[in-house]
Image (spheres, rainbow, N blue to C red):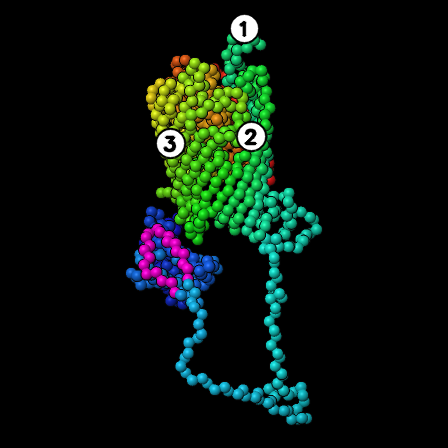
Amino acid sequence: MHSASYIHRNGTALNLLKLLLLIAAALCPGAVRPQPAQQSTNQQRIPRQVPQQKSALEGVVRDPTGRAIVGARVILRNLKSETHQEKLTNAEGVFRHLDLPPGTYELKVVSEGYEEFFESSLDLKPGEVLIRDVKLTPLPAAAPPPTGLPELPQMKTAAPPVAAEPIPGKYPEALQRPDTAPAAAPSPPQPLPSPDQVFHPEPDRWLITMPDWDRYGTGGEHPYVKGRWWDPFDQNKLKGDVPIFGQRTFFILTGLSDTFFDGRRLPVPSDVSTARPGSSEFFGKGEQAFLDQVFLFSFDLFHGDTSFRPVDWRIRVTPAVSLNYLDVRELGIVNIDVRAGTTRLDSHFGLQEAFAEVKLHDLSPNYDFISVRAGIQGFNSDFRGFIFVDEQPGVRLFGNLKSNLYQYNVAYFNFLEKNTNSGLNSFALRNQQVIIANLYRQDFFFKGYTAQFSVHYNKDDATIHFDDNGFLVRPAPVGGVVSNNMVRPHSIRAAYLGWTGDGHIGPVNLTHAFYQALGDDSFNGIAGRRVTINAQMAALELSVDKDWARFKTSMFYASGSANPRGGRARGFDAIEDFSEFAGGIFSLWNREGIRLTGAGVTLTPPNSLLPSLRSNKDEGQANFVNPGIFLANAGANFDLTPKLRSFVNVNYLRFERTEPLELLLFQAPIRHTIGVDSSIGVRYRPPLTENISITGGAAALVPGQGFRDIYGSRTLFSLFTDIRFQF
């Protein structure tokens, strides 16, 4: 280290070294060879050196039927420097000219038996990859042209020379010279083997019969394992490994069993009852237990080629069955009728997917495409589920461009009602439509960072709806919505403009989001009037990976309404969110729904970070007069083994504005601090696949002063387990 640094710093030592090399080269020619110059790729590694921008041309050469032409000569000439490059198309007819200086080029494609293709001017800009789909026209069949020379006369074949006979008795036969031995008669040419002797035809390239293999006689896994219908890991016709019929039509059957258990303690009001006369305690026993067993079956039939090429068409149907049980300790929770008791057993059948998909067109030889999908389908409109995550009937146009540099979606959904206790789809429409358009751009400003720009529009018409347990959820029974025993429904028109991003910038992993909500609510129950919507949401997560650990910190902000009786609603609310952020399902604040006692609405619905004061996330309407929230998170993920991952998160929660809460509860002041939400969790995958997955977690929310003003000082807790088996 020291001597090398000294030579680099001392010019005299460097000159002496050069002199010794020259002397060695003179004494031993060839022993010391000059080193080749460094390539440009090495030169670009010098710190702070800016690499030169290059261009590229690629494409495919086909005949009129669309078949690839192999071995076609693709000649590219730079019109300025008069230099040219020549490439041959590969087995798929693809050619690539890389690292081209920007400029104007001339393209020529030549192949035997086809007319020459010529394009006189191609402009290649710095950093651009130009794509060409070249089709060659076959030459017309013609007899060979006459040469104009007289035909040569037929020549007779000369007889083969006769070898001289050896003189008998002069030399022994064994000592005769080889050149004087009689020539052997030429053997007749051997016929070429027939094709059936050289090739072995296989009627099905997918189901090739393999020999039995048990080299050591011990049994177990070996090469050429024969698949079984019940085994998803080896070759299986039910898992899309081989066509169900033909050569390109596949079928995938997926069976899923999901068992979810949640034990929790939440603030619950004790209703007025003669069962406990003279009781004065407002908050009752908040312990609850919930068990949900879901069986899901997916039938997926599609026509395609490989895993890289988008399918030509697809039909998928996914029914689901839920059996759920709830046990609480207070009346009026499982049903609006207190005679229903404190337990509830319910079941529901829903259709979560039922769509058809067709690829409309291939846009380039690099699998760029455009497709359309119609029917009940799942859709997540951004990276972390901040605005819309649901399975609803609709039409979606989607695809990509520029070798998957861009991806896009344009979707329209017409909502179905949800079952209250399972969250699965019912079979009744709910008069709500959503339109979504988004665009993804990979390597946006930074390599490894993907940006997304989106527009959402929510059209939720005025309707009246009671959930399956008898509670009024649309409109939310709050404020001036219910007057003189009359319910006043209202409609919402809201648009969301958003920029989100996900990826990494150097060693730092980055996720962010910003949304601006605009629109109007024809009659907001809390405000008691028509309001215009102007609300914002922002989120940021930064993380760094250190070997088997990821350390992260994040922030979440949703604006709140400072004047709940005013004409402008400033509290942010989503359409149908499912936030995977700041601990996700491991966080108590995120996973559990906390009702606002005495108000007929929730403080925060299940699986949401937003204190939206809406009656129900699935069946209710968005509410933009709410307190908003600020959240700060610190957490870490640890890959303890390849099969076991653990999660640790701590969240600090705070209301942005408390005026809407003070108005609803007729209580002032209510302070801002919600509290500290701490959670731990694990995810275990025994076979290192998603076929068996066990997830569990525990969380506790220690109330802050604002939460105590509303509910008291009892610590909330939650324990959950999710066991999933998938075929």
Question: Residue 489 placed where, x, y %?
Answer: 42, 22
Under mark 1, the amino acid is: Gly
Front residue of this view, candidates 636 and 333: 333
Structural crowding at the residue carrying mark 3, measured as other residues with C-alpha within 10 Å and reported as few (<14), some (14–19) or many (≥20):
many
Query: Which element is circle 2 on?
Result: strand
Residue lying at the far top of the rendered structure: 278
Q: Is residue 111 magenta?
A: no
Residue that label 3 marks:
495
Q: Nearer the viewer, mark 2 or mark 3?
A: 3
User: Does residue 486 sit above or below 590 in this rendering?
Assistant: above
Q: Earlier in the sequence, mark 1 or mark 2?
A: 1
Q: Give the quarter of the image for residue 512.
A: top left
Determine whether the residue tagged by mark 3 lies in a helix, strand or loop.
Answer: strand
Q: What's the residue at 67%, 89% (across, down)?
A: 172
Q: Is residue 419 above or below residue 367?
A: above
Amino acid type assigned to the residue bearing label 2 in the image: Gly
Q: Which sits in the foreground, 653 or 75?
A: 75
Most extreme residue toward the right, as rendered? 217
Main SS type for the magenta part? strand
* Residue at 45 percent of width and 35 percent of height: 413
Q: In whole angstroms, how far apart are the C-alphas of marks 1 and 3?
A: 51 Å
Question: Going from the N terminus, do you reach mark 1 or mark 3 first?
Answer: 1
What residue is pinned by disc 2?
696
- Image coordinates of residue 378 in percent, x first then y, are 49, 36
Estimate how packed mark 2 is, as few (under 14), some (14 to 19) or many (20 or more) residues with alpha carbons within 10 Å. Answer: many
Q: Is residue 624 in sight in this rendering? A: yes
Residue under pointer 1: 278
Q: Is residue 354 left or right of residue 564?
A: right
Task: Identify the residue shown where x is 35% and y is 18%.
Answer: 565
Side of 434 relative to 220 (left or right)? left
Which residues fall within the magenta stretch? 116-136
What's under tag 3, amino acid-wise?
Ala
